[in-house]
Amino acid sequence: MDERVDSFQKVDDVFYPTAETLEHARIKDYDAAYKESIRDRLVFWENAARELEWFSPWTRVLEWNYPWAKWYVGATCNITHNCLDRHLTSGRKNKVALIWVGEDNTERFFTYGELYRQVSRCANALKALGIRKSDRVAIYLPKIPEQTIAMLACARVGAIHTVVYSGFSAPALASRLEDSQPRLIITADVGYDRGKVIPLKPVVDDAVANSPFIETVVVVRREKGGPALSGPKELDWEDWLKREAPSCPAEVMDAEDPLYFLYTSGTTGKPKGVQHVHGGYMVGTYLTTKIVFDLTDDDIYFCVADPGWVTGHSYIVYGPLLNGATILMAEGKPDYPNPGRWWQLIERYGVTIFYTTPTAIRLLMKYGEEWPKKYDLSSLRILGSVGEPINPEAWRWYHRVTGSKLPIMDTWWQTETGMILVTPLACTKQKPGSAARPFLGIEADVVDREGKSLPPNTGGFAVITSPWPAMMRTIYKDPERYKVYWNTIPGCYTAGDVCRKDDDGYFFFMGRADDVIKVAGNRIGTAEVESALVSHQAVAEAAVIGKPHKTAGESIKAFIILKQRFQESPELIQALKDHVKHELGKIAVPHEIEIVTGLPKTRSGKIMRRVLKAKELGQNPGDISTLEE
């Protein structure tokens, strides 16, 4: 059966790097660098690993027993040694590692020396509780410095951290605790969201009520006069740390020892515990942060993700700290107290690298260009996008409001991959809506169900055809589920996304394979229809689903959020349909368009189309624990 996906979207504009960007770029010639990296991939990844410090060397770079991989076999290391200790002796001891800004604009600064001391105190406190190598520790904290400190402290003593986003409900937290069975959970009394106080401790109380494996609850106190801690099982964070020594040696870990479990956002079915390890994950996040974002010692790096998601793990905590970067971490939403929040922070701190999501960009588009124009954004030199395909109109807006000269790293990767796999580099030309080409050392393709490469501009399945260091090692407690990624299409890691490559080999991701709509014999990716809709001046955001249709197989229904100055009318609905017809052709025109005020999303920003579809068809939506309220 031919399961190719028809592609109707055409992108004609191409943006080339400026002379200034090219002069600064670490990689000057992508084609030459990529060809060299693939000529002997193991040498390439070995050279990358040699830029970091190891306690003992590897005997083999890769042991590959399909579909199981071991990287840097026999080597010992600890990722926190390279995040912290290495910088104390390289002149970065007094460099600012982390700038934190609270929702109320409270500031906290940590140099590499101070971060080392805080992590060491926390590591010693963990040891005092008997937490050792391979023990699990749950972290249920808002985006505050203690979240990063706790992650690093766990890794330092060899414990496996599982960070749970602090917006999850008690049942969602409890299900993750039941699976990972941690001995300790670290939380806070409250979080803050749009000026409201969000109680977190009661959520933890409910979640651990029937969790006999939780021995201790540590609470970061943010509110004065908050509820008293109850019993010896609960500890105050400050009291827990204050007597501990500010130095703690990093545990010697095998390169393949687990670093963390992270439960996927669950856009399809039950969340699963993705397992990453110290060695390969360290190399992959280090190198991609360095090269994709063209990182230098002078940069101020601002990623808006939460460490509760993989982007926060890889590109707020580990990747930037491995490179000795200065990280800006900001609590709060992009439009609170007003839509200038992030632009104001960029101006205030002289941010040079800004990494955000298409969802956030489209939210800010809704408020117009006058907000970014209020601020001096001239410090920026690299932009980034992550989370889902960025539609061309959002790409162009992002490019335009930041000065019309900056490269946008439209990165494609997953929780399971650990690191960026397909991306532009500062030296490459860019096409709005395209993630460009594979990162160095990565072999990616677009194939049919049998694994055969497809010709240009033919939609198929996005796959990776060889292992990479930061790849997940298994699904915790469910190795059979891990095998599905490698056994769906022979000889490939199958990402679950549909994609096409153009004549230049540029990847255009078209949505999830599960979301492909079959209309009158045509297989249409959701991303293309949504992109066409968002390119209309009235549309801020769009999601489309397929509905059963007697003659066509499926029809397309679109859910639309309008920009502030537009109102629903029959004329506007028809104009939207005409616009899609013009952009993509008659076959892709939605049969129905419904104007809505919100869309169901995971808290990491991905639209949950299956929830829309289930509601539309009167079905059970399945697991919705990650649904944004």
Image (cartoon, rainbow, N blue to C red):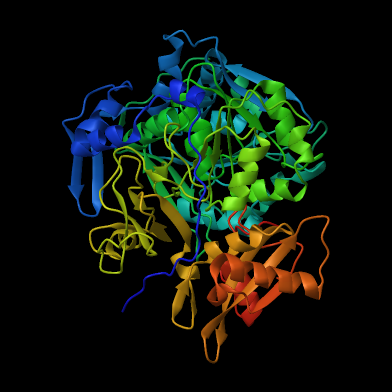
> Number of labelled discs?
0
Residue 390 location, x and y as percent? 55, 51
In depth, the one of 248 and 272 nearer the eye is 272
Q: Is residue 46 left or right of residue 350?
A: left
Residue 111 location, x and y as percent? 57, 15
Q: Is residue 244 left or right of residue 375?
A: left
Tell me the residue at 44%/49% (across/down).
414
Tell me the residue at 55%/12% (across/down).
95
Residue 141 vs 533, above or below: the answer is above
Residue 248 location, x and y as percent? 45, 18
User: Quadrant location of residue 491?
Assistant: bottom left
In depth, the one of 611 and 411 nearer the eye is 411
User: Quadrant location of residue 60?
Assistant: top left
Query: Does residue 26 show up?
Result: yes
Q: Residue furthest bottom?
A: 550
Query: Does residue 604 show up?
Result: no
Q: Is residue 106 left or right of residue 326?
A: right
The image quadrant where one finds the C terminus is bottom right
User: Quadrant location of residue 364?
Assistant: top right
Residue 116 location, x and y as percent? 51, 18
The image quadrant where one finds the N terminus is bottom left
In depth, the one of 297 and 193 nearer the eye is 297
Q: Is residue 600 left or right of residue 275?
A: right
Q: Residue furthest left?
A: 59
Tell me the residue at 78%/38% (across/down).
371
Residue 516 vs 148, above or below: the answer is below
